[in-house]
Image: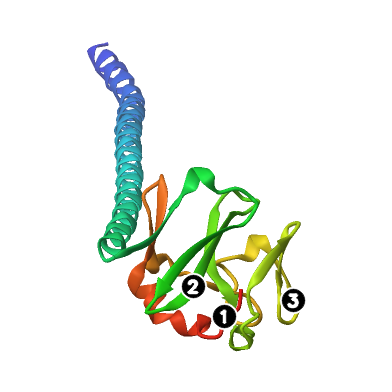
Amino acid sequence: MKKNKIEIHKKASGNNQPNNYKKLIIMGVAAISMFALIGCSSASKSSTATANNATSNSSNSNSNSTGSSKESKTEATNKAASNIVPAIEINKSEISNKVKFYPYESNGIKMEVLALKANDGTIRTALNTCQVCYSSGKGYYVQEGNELVCQNCGNRFSADMVGKAKGGCNPVPISDTSKADDGTKITIDKNYLDKNKAYFSHWKA
């Protein structure tokens, strides 16, 4: 009888062992899964933080680049303005789409600068003489509507192109380095005018 009880107990114990192993395996798998989920969450947060930092750094870099560009433009403008020797001063408030002429004399040679407001609202300036017809003495301009007309060859030139077009039968443009704009007035450089007096050596306006 005792033997039967012992055998029954052993069998019962033997039958429970596989169940215990299964439980341990399930618990182990669950624990591994939890660790894996926690690790993925941490990695995701780290990745997001890295991306945010990269975006922030990129934004700051672009901001600094834009700021530097603006500063260098301002410095260049200030440097150009500091080298300007005033010869003609044009009050911007008096400029409209109707051309206005400003006289200047260099060593006895009479010259003229023209100024007008283009359709985009910007004020354009140029020498009132043609780059091709100046030697005839009649290469100066008279306004007709929204055009400037060369009095030597009759070429018609859009007012919106004053100060932009170079070469051909166009008014001689005045470069940005040869004038200064302080927001109220435009100052034309004396040195620039004196260097270009030859354009007016036969001028008969």
Which of the two labelled residues, at mark 3 and mark 1, occupies the earlier sequence position? Answer: 3
Please give the name of the residue rendered at 34% of the width and 58% of the height, measured from the top-left corner.
Answer: 73
Nearest-to-viewer mark from 3 and 2: 2
Q: Residues within 10 Å of mark 2 (few under 14, many from 20)?
A: many
Pointers 2 and 1 in contact (CB under 8 A)?
Answer: yes
Compared across the picture, whether 49 is left or right of 165 comes to: left
Residue beneath the point at 64% across and 79% down = 139
* Residue 106 horizontal/vertical position (percent): 39, 76
What residue does disc 1 label?
A: 203
- The answer to whether residue 46 is left or right of residue 155 is left
Mark linked to residue 155: 3
Tell me the quadrant of the picture where the C terminus can be found: bottom right
Task: Determine whether 133 is above or below 79 in the image.
Answer: below
Q: Nearer the viewer, residue 121 or 105?
A: 105
Marks 3 and 2, how far apart at CA: 21 Å
Q: What is the three-letter code of the residue carrying label 3?
A: Asn
Question: Rounded to the nearest whole Å, what is the CA distance between mark 2 and mark 1?
Answer: 8 Å
Q: Which badge, 2 or 1, is on the more N-terminal residue?
A: 2
Pick the residue in front: 96 or 77: 96
For mark 1, give the secondary structure. Answer: loop
Residue 202, picture quadrant: bottom right
Work out whether residue 115 or residue 183 is closer to the camera in this orientation and state it: 115
Find the distance from the CA under tag 3 to the CA under tag 1.
17 Å
Q: Residue at x 60, y 48 (%)?
A: 96
For badge 2, the amino acid type reads: Met
Q: The residue under label 1 is which amino acid type?
A: Trp
Secondary element at tag 2:
strand
Task: Tell me where residue 159 sits by quadrant.
Answer: bottom right
Kindly identify which numbered label has been placed on residue 111. 2
Label 3 vs label 1, nearer the camera: 1
Under circle 3, the secondary element is loop
